[in-house]
Structures are given as structure tokens and as C-alpha cells.
Amino acid sequence: MRASFSSFLLILSIILLSGVIAYVGDFLGRRIGRKKLSLFKLRPRYTAFLVSIITGILIATVTLLVLSAASEDVRTALFGMQELREQLNSLNQEVIARSLELENTKKRLEDYQSRVQELETKERELQNSKAALEEQTRLLGETVAQLEKQRDELQQELTSLRAELARLRSGIVAIRQGRIVFQDDEEILRAILPGGMSEDKAQEALLAVIRKGDQLALQKGAGRHSETGQAVFVPEEDFRQAIDRIHNASNDVVVRLVAAINSLQGEPVIARMYVDENRKIFSQGEIVYQKALTIDEETNIDALLGEVLRELNAVGLKQGILPQEGKVGIISASNLTEVFQELESIRGKIVLRAVAEEDIFTAGPLRVRLEVLKEQTPEGQATQSEQGGQNDTA
């Protein structure tokens, strides 16, 4: 606003000054014309022209001087035009150069932007690769952890196998030296317990069986466990199953404590528990076994009785009588001697039979009495044991 007012004042001043100069020039021209004055020996008419010309020159000169004094731009336009042209040309050249530089810069910028896009794409790919590598690293870490766990388990298993190997070697040595307390699957003891007991009472009864087994094992040379102090160890699973079977049984049961492995002298015995229903198999006086035989001079009575005892043992096992030391039958020595003597004195066909001396149950033993019948059983006729529904040995 201030610059516009100054310009307006300058223009107004120039107009007023030009008017004053024109007035003075006109006034002088008229005076010269009236008085017919002459300048430079010119005619008055030409002198008046000269004054008008000088007046115009003065107006232009004063205008230029005032404008030059008032504005630097006017001075530059009047006296620095060439320099301005040169500067303009220089600026034009610089603009062209800058334009070229700008074009080059734009191209470089486009290249940079393209490279930036490529780098961003590569960065995304690297991020994806990084994520994949991290996932692989995590999976590898889990695999390493699993392998280390397997290695530890294998080392523990190896240690256990080495210990087992050492134990087996010592067992072999012990077997060679005869230092086995109980052999694998050898019965330690058996007990008959009432079925249907409560679980607590069944547990107490089984613990009593184990304590008795401890005493027997210690008497035979077994050692106590370093932590529990027991000579007989029964796995928890077998123990719980035995309790359940006793609790659920409706009749008396036979509980057998059996060595699970060969037990060395001085070591605790690892045992299993077997629970079987103690059912009646033979009644007192019932024929358990009978066989038709022919006795002559060449008959070996010892071999004959041995074969009969083996067959009698097989009958007991087949009927479900639990063996003791691999045998189920018991015959008194006096009865066996009597039968032996009787067979030595007989020639011809006879029937040898075994009769139960008492009620015989699953727990055994198969206690029988041998009898020799001189009457021959007709060929094809069923024996008394077969008629009673029992399994006989031919």
C-alpha cells in the first residue's frame, strides 16, 4: 500500500513539474514572440521554436532525472539494459542448464524410485525369507530339543541296558556258581484267601503274604532293597490287580507269589502275584485216573509207575490244579511201595487207578491213593472217571 502511494505521488509530482515547465516554456515563447527576441542570431519565429523544443527537452530530461532519482529500476532500465540483457542471457543459459540438470535429476530420481521399489520388493522378500528362516530355526530348535531328549532317553536306556547286561552277566556267573535264590517263574509261596473281601482287607491280606514271602526269601539268602528294606518286591500294577480280583471273587481264591526273574543271592526278589479261584476239582473218593495194563516178566515196574505218575500229573494240570515245583500230585511213600510190591507179584491184565484221598481244589495238591484191580476193564467200556465226566489219560 505504501509503495503504491509513493508511486502515485511520484507520478503526480512529474505531471505537476512537467506542467510547470511547459507553462514556463510557453510563457517564454510568447514573450519572445511579442518582443521579437532572437537567440543565436535566429529569427524570432525560429527562436520561439527553439524555446518550445528546449522546453520539451527539459520536460523529458527532468522526468528522466526525477524517475532516475526516485527509482533504481528506472536507472537500471536506462543505464543497465545491456547488462540486464547479458544477465538475462546468462540466466536463460542457467535456466536451460538447470532444466537439463532437472531432467537428469528427474531421470535419476526415477531410477532411484525404481531402485527403491526393487529394494522394497527385495526387502519384502527378505522379510518373508527371514520369517521362513525364523520358522525353520524354531522347528530346528524343536527338532534339536527332541533329538536331545531322545539322546538323553537313549543314554538312560543304554545305562539301563548296561546295568541289565551286568546283572545278566552276574546272573550267569551266579547260575554257574549255583547262587540263584529263586529261578524265573518259581513259586515262592501260596495262600488261600476268602473272596469278596473289601479292598482294605484284601490289601492287608496281600501285605501279610508279601511279609511271609520276605521271611522265606531272606531264609533262602535273598537281600533287602536299599530303600524299602523288603526282600520281595511286587509291582504296583500286579498288587492292585490282585486286590481287585480278590474283592470281586465270589469263592475262595489262591494267591501265588512267583519270582518274575532269576533272583540272585543277596539281592531282593522281584515277584508277580497270581490270583485264581480255588474251585473244587475232585471230591474225596472220586476216581481221578485209571489205566488198563498188562504185567509180564519183562515189565519194568519202576518205568511203569514213573509213566503213570507223569500221566497223573498231566491230568491234574489239565483239570486246573496249580503246580508246585512243576508237580501237582502227591502219593504217600507207603502206598507207592505197596503198589510196587503188588505189581511185582501180579502177571496178566490189571487196572491201575488213582482215587482222591480228600477233596481236591485248584490250590492242590493232587493227593491220591493208587489201587490195583485184578479185574480187566472190558475193551471199549468207559472207565469210571469218564462216566463221572472227568478227563482220563489212556
Image: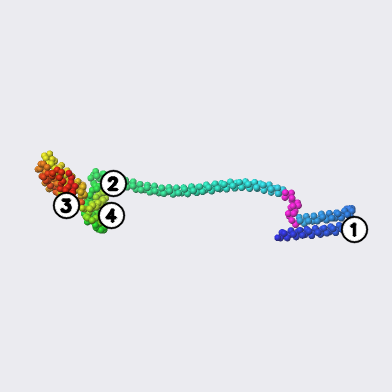
State the separation of the CA atoms marked 1 and 4: 162 Å
In this view, the mark in front (1 or 4): 4
Answer yes or no: is residue 172 visible. yes
Q: Residue at x 26, y 51 (%)?
A: 272
Would residue 34 appear left or right of 80 to someone viewing this image? right
- Find residue 236 and report its horizontal and vertical position in percent: 29, 53
* CB contact under 8 Å: marks 2 and 3: no
User: In the shown orientation, is residue 361 left or right of residue 132?
Assistant: left
| Residue at 82 percent of width and 55 percent of height | 56
Q: Which residue is mark 1?
A: 35
- Judging by the rendered image, the residue that carries numbered circle 4 is 240
Indicate which label's residue lies in the foreground, 2 or 4: 4
Please tell me which of labels 2 and 3 falls first in the chain. Answer: 2
Identify the residue at the far top of this view.
298
Residue hosting label 3: 283
Q: Secondary structure at mark 3?
A: loop
The crowding category of the residue bearing disc 4, from other C-alpha atoms within 10 Å (few below 14, some 14 to 19, many at least 20), is some
The residue tagged with tag 1: helix, strand or loop?
helix
Amino acid type at circle 1 is Lys
Q: CA distance from mark 4 to mark 3?
A: 33 Å
